[in-house]
Image (tube, rainbow, N blue to C red):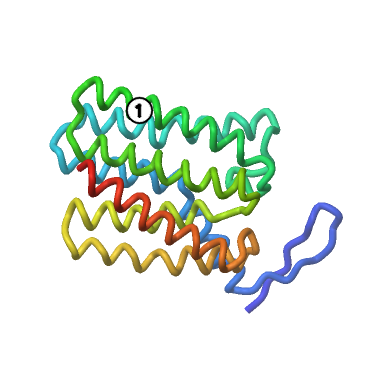
């Protein structure tokens, strides 16, 4: 099944069911949505809604504000920050939010899992930033986020939560299908998220 959409110059583009499914997956798996959700889930496991709210601000609300603020002033082309050259500023700004969040957690004596989430996101994004900026290679943040989520949820709630890892190949496929990333970029992103976020979270929580 295909449908026609039109570009700004009026050219017809054929969109298949797979195209539409991939577009939906990319929106639904956006780190803008995923990061606050895992922050709420892990934060709630500690029983502290105050720390859950603070964690969500630093890992979700402020990063989303950075992205949509940059979009509003046309510093980036889209909320997925598809253009690699636009990523350094966004990554640096979000790293700043995560560093501030980690400082608040350490100074305020946050529960271990809350601190661990912030630290895991910080270290993972730091590695992704090095690959993106120094290596000049657009590794997938979407894939890294979902692999990291699976690792953190499994360490928090037990092995059954590893079922969330089933989302990772779906996200990888979506990123590759819309041609925002190559398969190696999406796979390396997933491996980075699983290893870096998983190890950091395990060491701290």
Looking at the picture, does residue 49 appear above or below residue 86? Answer: above
Q: Most extreme residue toward the top, as rendered?
A: 107
Looking at the picture, does residue 36 appear above or below residue 199? Answer: above
Instruction: Name the residue rendered at 41%, 36% in the picture.
Output: 60
**Quadrant of the image containing the C terminus:** top left
Q: How many numbered marks are there?
A: 1
Instruction: Name the residue rendered at 49%, 33% in the picture.
Output: 94
The residue where tag 1 is placed is 101
Rate crowding at label 1 as few (under 14), some (14 to 19) or many (20 or more) other CA atoms within 10 Å.
many
The residue nearer to you, when weighing 145 against 203, is 203
Residue 132 x/y as whole percent: 59, 48
Q: Secondary structure at mark 1?
A: helix
Residue 181 x/y as whole percent: 61, 61
Instruction: Name the residue rendered at 40%, 48% in the picture.
Output: 34
Instruction: Name the residue rendered at 61%, 41% in the picture.
Output: 87
Q: Most extreme residue toward the bottom, as rendered?
A: 1
Give residue 163's quadrant in the image.
bottom left
The residue nearer to you, when weighing 178 against 2, is 178
**Quadrant of the image containing the N terminus:** bottom right
């Amino acid at each position: 099944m295909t449908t026609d959409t039109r570009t700004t110059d009026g050219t017809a583009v054929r969109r298949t069911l797979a195209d539409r499914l991939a577009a939906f997956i990319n929106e639904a798996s956006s780190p803008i949505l995923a990061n606050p959700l895992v922050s709420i889930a892990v934060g709630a496991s500690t029983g502290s809604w105050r720390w859950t709210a603070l964690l969500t601000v630093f890992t979700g609300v402020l990063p989303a504000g950075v992205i949509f603020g940059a979009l509003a002033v046309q510093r980036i082309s889209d909320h997925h920050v598809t253009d690699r050259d636009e990523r350094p500023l966004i990554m640096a700004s979000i790293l700043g939010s995560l560093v501030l969040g980690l400082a608040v957690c350490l100074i305020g004596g946050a529960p271990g899992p809350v601190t661990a989430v912030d630290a895991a996101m910080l270290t993972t994004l730091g590695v992704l930033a090095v690959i993106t900026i120094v290596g000049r290679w657009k590794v997938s943040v979407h894939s890294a986020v979902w692999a990291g989520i699976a690792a953190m949820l499994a360490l928090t709630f037990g092995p059954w939560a590893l079922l969330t890892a089933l989302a990772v190949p779906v996200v990888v496929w979506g990123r590759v299908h819309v041609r925002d990333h190559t398969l190696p970029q999406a796979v390396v992103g997933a491996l980075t998220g699983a290893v870096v976020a998983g190890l950091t979270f395990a060491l701290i929580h």
